[in-house]
Image (cartoon, grey):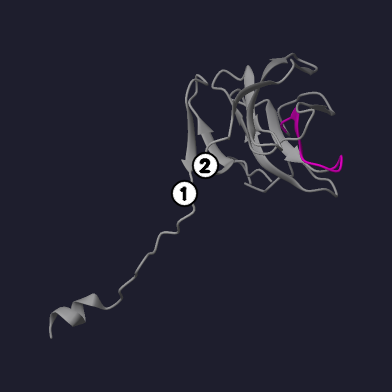
Amino acid sequence: MAVPLEGDRKPIPVVKTQFQESTGAISPDGRWVAYSSNDSGRREIYVQAFPGAGGPKGRWQISKEGGYEVKWRGDGKELYYESTDGKMMAVAIQAGPQDVRPETSRVLFSADFPVVSLHTFDVTSDGQRFLLILARGGSTQRLTVVSNWQAALRK
């Protein structure tokens, strides 16, 4: 769903199917939305016109071997996503007035280092740096919460 910040602020559906869509990302120019859907039987990345932007109907499949979380480069000419086998992928996008033409996806790097998940990544607007949450060698961190600690100081 998207909520316009002007007018009646009534939520509008962005993608509405019987399948599971997630990780939506609006293009920097506001004309397109990239998202993940499982309607093919596995998660793939798609792009379609953002509602109200006056774009064409339909959608274009971006990933070919599965895809999760998706982010746009700051100029809208490239998408980044995680493949189902843990690789960070990039695909150049040519968005015309009536369609989207993705080039062949390419691997940027593989998560063969201990990451919690690539599902929660971010990328700089120029696409040159990625932020990932690294895992710590299998050990768990312990967090102790002390409530009403001021009362303990008075004793």
Q: Position of residue 26 (x, y in %)?
A: 63, 32
Observer-nearest of 13 and 119: 119
Rendered view: 84 above or below 103? below
| 149 with respect to 20 (left or right) | left
Is the residue under label 2 in contact with that under label 1 (CB below 8 Å)?
A: yes
Q: Position of residue 136 (x, y in %)?
A: 45, 48
Per the image, the residue denoted by label 1 is: 137
The reply to whether residue 5 is visible in this rendering is no
| 13 with respect to 109 (left or right) | right
Q: Position of residue 118 (x, y in %)?
A: 58, 39
Q: Secondary structure at mark 1?
A: loop
Rendered view: 127 above or below 14? above
> Could you tell which of marks 1 and 2 lies nearer the N-terminus?
2
| 151 with respect to 42 (left or right) | left
Q: Residue at x 39, y 64 (%)?
A: 142
Give, as a three-letter code, the residue at label 2: Pro
- Density class for disc 1 (Cα within 10 Å; few <14, some 14-19, many ≥20) is few
**Displayed quadrant of residue 85:** top right
**Residue farthest along the left direction in this orientation:** 154
Observer-nearest of 66 and 8: 66
Q: Residue at x 49, y 20 (%)?
A: 128
Give, as a three-letter code, the residue at label 1: Gly
Would residue 59 be counted in the magenta stretch?
Answer: no
Q: Which quadrant holds the C terminus?
A: bottom left
Magenta stretch, residue numbers: 39-50
Rendered view: 84 above or below 9? above
Per the image, the residue denoted by label 2 is: 114
The reply to whether residue 124 is visible in this rendering is yes
**Displayed quadrant of residue 106:** top right
